[in-house]
Image (cartoon, rainbow, N blue to C red):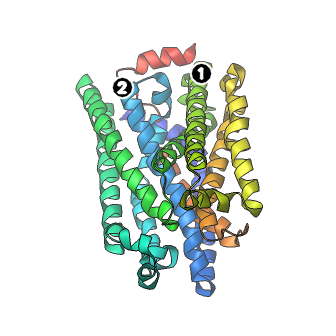
Amino acid sequence: MSARRETSASTAETVARYWKPALGVGVVALGACVAGALANPDQFFRSYLLAFVFWNGLTIGSLAVLMLQYLTGGAWGIAIRRELEAATRTLPLMVLAFLPVLFGAHRLYEWTHAEAVAHDAILQKKTFYLNVPFFAVRAAIAFAAWMAIAYTLNRWSLLQDERPGKDLDRRLALLSGGGLVVYALTTTFTSVDWVMSLEPHWYSTMYGVLYIVGQALAALALVSLTVVRLSGGEPLADFLGPRIRHDLGKMMFAFTMLWAYVSFSQYLIVWSGNLPEEISWYLARFRGGWGFIGVAVLLLNFVVPFLLLLSRRANRNPRLLALAAGILLAMRFVDVAWLVLPAFSPAAFRIHWMDLLAPLGLGGLWLAFYARNLTARPLLPIHDPGFEEALAHGRE
């Protein structure tokens, strides 16, 4: 318990500089969006969906990376475990944040309009799945599963701090194995529900995988930025050595490559099929200004991070590692916008002020919760069975 107090105190000042301003910015930005909703409710819900998809992706992506670490082990995971846990504990906020999406479903999704379904044979065939009650039930199932897994992992991790033992380590690994299967299934159908069904005539068997990889990459970028920022003080100063920074860089490099592979695979499948109902999705995203956004995503979400993280020197340099993580995190938001916004404006590039302010507002609240969660527990799981080995690895 003394270690817990000591660690929390050592990071409290740093974290305090962030969570209060983030909360203030979030409240003001969301207040402006609510005011904007009075004049343009359709635009509000479109912008809010973008914000929700991105920030919920960070939360669930952190849960996935946390479970992956429990399964694979490694010093890199011990270095970022507390940051991942802090991100998963924002799930109650995301449950509340989903309510506007549910209430605004009629303004977001074509398949909620009875008159549109009545004149569309394809939508009629999908009514069993695409209907508001079942949409809400699936969301409830997903959130219940995510919260149950996150709560149990956090609880057992805290017990490990208080009562070290290999039995908890095995239980955490077993839960993570099954939890990753549940995560893959629930994230796949929520990606279809929340984003792909914005254009209900289009479908892709790769979409869920692309969504999952993007979430994990965003989570890795966020926690890497966090640990580099906090490594100037104890306890991370002694732990986050060049080798662990190198490991984090390699993990981001691997997921960057995987994202590029899945993205290209989806494009190749659609291109080779050359079917009107499939290519329409890409045509909307390569017309006008959306095409420039697509090129920016390719360059800054793959090429630039690839070149940065390919270098061993860059991975070990905290500033260059933070730069690569920052670029990836920012471009993950741009990529999500590229997936969501053209569904509402396929003919021409169009960005509304709420498309920027809604993510800023919800993000301010999310970051405030995340920062506060960081002070609730020690930044390092010192009673983890692999901690001493990870500490020696970090000092090399």
**Residue 387 visible to the viewer:** yes
Circle 1: element type: loop
Residue for point 59% across, 19% down: 243
Quadrant in the picture for the N terminus: top left
Nearer to the camera, 213 or 223 = 213
Q: Position of residue 210 (x, y in %)?
A: 52, 46
Nearer to the camera, 311 or 105 = 105
Residue for point 74% across, 49% down: 296
Quadrant in the picture for the C terminus: top right
Q: Which mark is residue 384?
A: 2
Q: Position of residue 56 (x, y in %)?
A: 48, 56
Nearer to the camera, 5 or 113 = 113
Which badge, 2 or 1, is on the more N-terminal residue? 1
Placement of 100 over or under 180, stated as above or below:
below
Tell me which amino acid carries mark 2.
Asp
Tell me which amino acid carries mark 1.
Gly
Q: CA distance from mark 2 to mark 1?
A: 19 Å
| Residue 189, quarter of picture | bottom left
Circle 2: element type: loop
How packed mark 2 is, by other alpha carbons closer than 10 Å (few <14, some 14-19, many 20 or more), is some
Horizontally, residue 122 falls left or right of residue 52, namely left
Horizontally, residue 361 falls left or right of residue 137, namely right
Q: Which mark is residue 241?
A: 1
**Residue 5 visible to the viewer:** no
Residue for point 63% across, 38% down: 229
Q: Position of residue 106 (x, y in %)?
A: 46, 79
Placement of 344 over or under 322, stated as above or below:
below
| Residue 159, quarter of picture | top left
Residue for point 67% across, 43% down: 301
Placement of 43 over or under 92, stated as above or below:
below
Q: Which mark is residue 19?
A: none
